[in-house]
Image (cartoon, coloured by chain):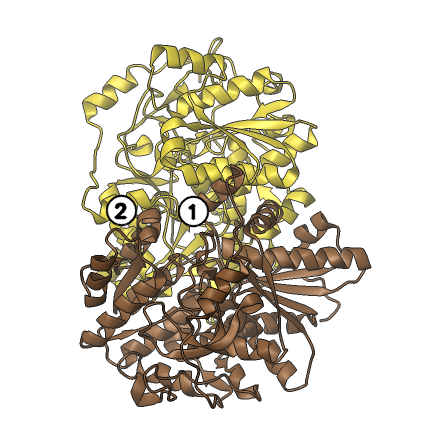
Chain colours: A yellow, B brown
């Protein structure tokens, strides 16, 4: 079918949808470093993690060898409600840019959570239910993950307690309301409902909260309430495993038309979308079957890959979680206010960090004003209002397409469009009104943050 | 393919997408009554309407005989960006209701305008551009139409001036911001920018505006600014023609699997979605080829079909527009505050009014609290947060499915899911907080409104 006219949108049939997730760790020579107990600095095993996570999810988290995990039937049924997501040929964008490049994007925003987060939310909720649990706890910042988890729990009849960073809770009442529609309880964090919340409120009255604080509250509730576990929407190996459905569908859709990408681009916060998108392609590269350029795009205000340290660090600012080896800006690093809430995490998935460290991936940081310029251009010609996070990938896809215009190369560019910006219009308004600013951390600020990294284990 | 397993979502291929719109008037024995000049009470012809509407759109408006209008290539390309929309088999809803009924919905919300309005917006903008016009004007209440038109104009490089009912402008800043993203100018109505706006502001200082007032401003600007015309998102024959793409796709998708619906349900404000959805099925019925039940669903607070008069009335509250014969509550009727802004129009499409009058269609009115109960149930099991307007159709689809449960009948129900509720979360919040009220006009209120209907032409 290589010469067949490629449609605007490629949809797989239900039969063509992936039946297993792909675990890229199985093909990595250098495996991602294990999670460490922050007290003993020893690797954490199954039993160490059982109080926090669901059993099956721990197995997935720790398994560096199994290449394919069958997707349970009930999850596949749920996927059919909103998947396959379309792989879109950006004919209109190509025309607008007058580039010889061929641009595709995998659009994950056509569901009520508005992003790819639902792919892992349903998996995590499913395993919690299978284990006979009553419910799960989590934190949410921008709100996509909390919404996705609420939807998954609402569908399965599982209780869902979301700790939402207080300033988001107040600034994004609509996100909160979507979660309530799906039956979740949403608590602004820090709250009086946990010991850690009360401690933080006593020390910092009037604080508007942080993701790290919300994580600490959600973990406390999960570990102290019988029948509950904690779930997380990014960073973890298990999340990248579930999100491989994005890359598997993308690859199947391209294969159907005989298209081989040259460049694969994704925005990177904790790494859930980028990791999922590139996994099967990276697997080919790791097995020596193909060669691609992979580009991770991060905000200049929170540049963990491009300016961070590759070191063991806490996953949360409250420093109660395990240590993970990753590119990090330091768990105390507070990025300047920017409008891509999903990309404000201080660290990066251990898998992606290892791949980047081993030279399999490039990284680029971009400033938010140029990101919104790309977002607006994209919205006008492709008809989709993109999320600020996704627009980081759009920015670099356009940049690469413009390079092709200069050189005349007909490269094939694939990028991940993780979601829609319907709940991010305050950001668009600031952009339209010329009030958007770009703030980049100074070297001195980063050095100060790096100085607070925990002691590094000697042998790892 | 009749016995093939029906997928969760049926997508047509690009080749299967409609190449022509279908004009149901061609098969109607009793044609919809013509628009009348409010001064002379004479039918308005091509020349009478040229100052307000684009030439080609007037031709479509007046043509009661041509059954198929080819869709221009540029519009078909635009459609391919967000169409075909999926016809979804509501397996999860059926399971939840434990009904033998088979439920399908045609989902039009997967585009940034969030509704089906884009189908006509691109057509109207296209013909305006073809005519060499500089731009178009319109009004918007809830905001879907304004957003859709902004997207279409942004794509074609046409100027777009939107008059947005002032209370919506203030309560829905995000809608406004989406329109700005697409380059539209958005003015709160009434405004100082028009004579009619200044007059209204002088008479009613502090008014929060109305759709009728916004129409009057948009028409004034269109008729007094060289190179501009006025466009409208519902009610008109031309709009139902463009929206027939919904029904044509639905029918093609059902035909592909040998499915014949028993009941077809749509929400009805001005009639654009319902008219588009049912057109090809109604055509079959009018030609004696098939028999269906068609149900129009309207809010109990604005019950034009179920409690209105079939009479000539003004299309706007400012009484500057032509008279249309339709089921109407009177152009001065102000429905109580309800959260389905798209269903608050006092009248109904002339085509649908005639079909209803001739007994081809049923109508039902529902109260908004029961509508939101249906909306929340639907959101939880089908994963889509529906618009309040669309949820009227969901309510009746569920009611019909529950009747099947009682009788054991395996009826096939198809309904139109016009859009998503991402910008309607204030309404969901009121519902969750138990603050939603149902207000139904009294007979006396309606009689008072009917008393102000204009003089009726004798011979029509």
Other-residue count near label 1 (Cα within 10 Å), few / some / many at <14 / 14–19 / ≥20: many
Q: Looking at the image, is mark 2 or mark 1 nearer the viewer? A: 2
Q: Residues within 10 Å of mark 2 (few under 14, many from 20)?
A: some
Image location (x, y in percent) of residue A442? 19, 27
Q: Position of residue B125 (x, y in %)?
A: 32, 73
Determine if marks 2 and 1 fall on one subunit: yes
Towards the viewer: B66 or B298: B298
Residue at the spot 48% in from the left edge and 81% down from the top edge: B20
Residue hosting label 2:
A429
Depth check: give the residue in front, A253 or B281: B281
For disc 2, the chain is A
Q: Is residue B38 above or below residue A97?
A: below
Secondary structure of the residue carrying numbered label 1: loop
Q: Residue at x 37, y 89 (%)?
A: B42
Instruction: Tell me whether the residue at label 2 lies in contact with that at label 1, contact meaning CB atoms closer than 8 angstroms.
Output: no
- Measure how far apart labels 2 and 1 are at the Cα level: 21 Å
The answer to whether B320 appears left or right of A25 in the picture is left
| Quadrant in the rendering for residue A457 | top left
Per the rendering, the mark at residue A418 is: 1
Q: Residue furthest right?
A: B408
Judging from the image, mark 1 belongs to the subunit labelled A
Whichever of callouts 2 and 1 sits on the residue coming sooner in the sequence is 1
Q: Is residue B145 visible?
A: yes
Q: Nearer the viewer, residue A62 or A344?
A: A344
């Amino acid at each position: 079918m290589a010469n067949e006219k490629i449609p605007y949108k490629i949809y797989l049939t239900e039969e063509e949808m992936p039946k297993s997730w792909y675990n890229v760790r199985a093909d990595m020579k250098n495996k991602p470093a294990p999670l460490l107990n922050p007290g003993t600095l020893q690797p954490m095993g199954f039993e160490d993690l059982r109080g926090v996570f669901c059993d099956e999810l721990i197995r997935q988290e720790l398994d560096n060898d199994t290449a394919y995990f069958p997707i349970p039937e009930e999850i596949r049924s749920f996927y059919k409600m909103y998947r396959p997501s379309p792989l879109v040929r950006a004919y209109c964008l190509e025309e607008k840019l007058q580039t010889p490049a061929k641009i595709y994007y995998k659009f994950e925003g056509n569901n009520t959570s508005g992003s790819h987060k639902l792919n892992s939310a349903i998996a995590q909720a499913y395993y919690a239910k299978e284990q006979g649990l009553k419910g799960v706890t989590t934190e949410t910042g921008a709100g996509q993950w909390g919404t996705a988890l609420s939807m998954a729990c609402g569908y399965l009849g599982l209780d869902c307690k979301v700790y939402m960073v207080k300033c988001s809770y107040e600034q994004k009442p609509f996100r909160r309301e979507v979660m309530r529609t799906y039956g979740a309880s949403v608590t602004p964090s820090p709250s009086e409902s946990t010991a850690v919340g009360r401690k933080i409120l006593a020390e910092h009255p009037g604080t508007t909260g942080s993701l790290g604080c919300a994580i600490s509250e959600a973990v406390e509730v999960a570990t102290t309430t019988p029948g509950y576990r904690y779930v997380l929407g990014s960073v973890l190996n298990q999340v990248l495993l579930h999100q491989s459905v994005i890359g598997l569908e993308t690859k199947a859709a391209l294969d159907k038309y005989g298209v081989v990408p040259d460049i694969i681009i994704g925005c990177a916060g904790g790494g859930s979308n980028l990791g999922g998108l590139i996994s099967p392609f990276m697997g080919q590269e790791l097995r020596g079957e193909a060669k691609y350029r992979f580009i991770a795009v991060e905000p200049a205000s929170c540049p963990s890959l491009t300016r961070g340290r590759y070191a063991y660090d806490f996953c949360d600012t409250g420093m109660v979680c395990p240590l993970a080896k990753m590119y990090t800006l330091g768990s105390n690093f507070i990025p300047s206010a920017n409008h891509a809430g999903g990309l404000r995490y201080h660290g990066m998935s251990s898998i992606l960090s290892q791949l980047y460290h081993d030279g399999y991936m490039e990284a680029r940081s971009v400033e938010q004003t140029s990101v919104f310029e790309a977002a607006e251009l994209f919205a006008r010609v492709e008809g989709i209002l993109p999320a600020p996070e996704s627009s980081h990938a759009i920015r670099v896809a356009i940049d690469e397409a413009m390079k092709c215009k200069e050189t005349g190369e007909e490269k094939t560019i694939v990028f991940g469009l993780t979601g829609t910006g319907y709940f991010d219009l305050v950001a668009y308004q600031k952009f339209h009104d010329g009030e958007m600013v770009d703030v980049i951390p100074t070297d001195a600020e980063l050095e100060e943050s790096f100085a607070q990294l925990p002691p590094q284990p000697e042998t790892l």
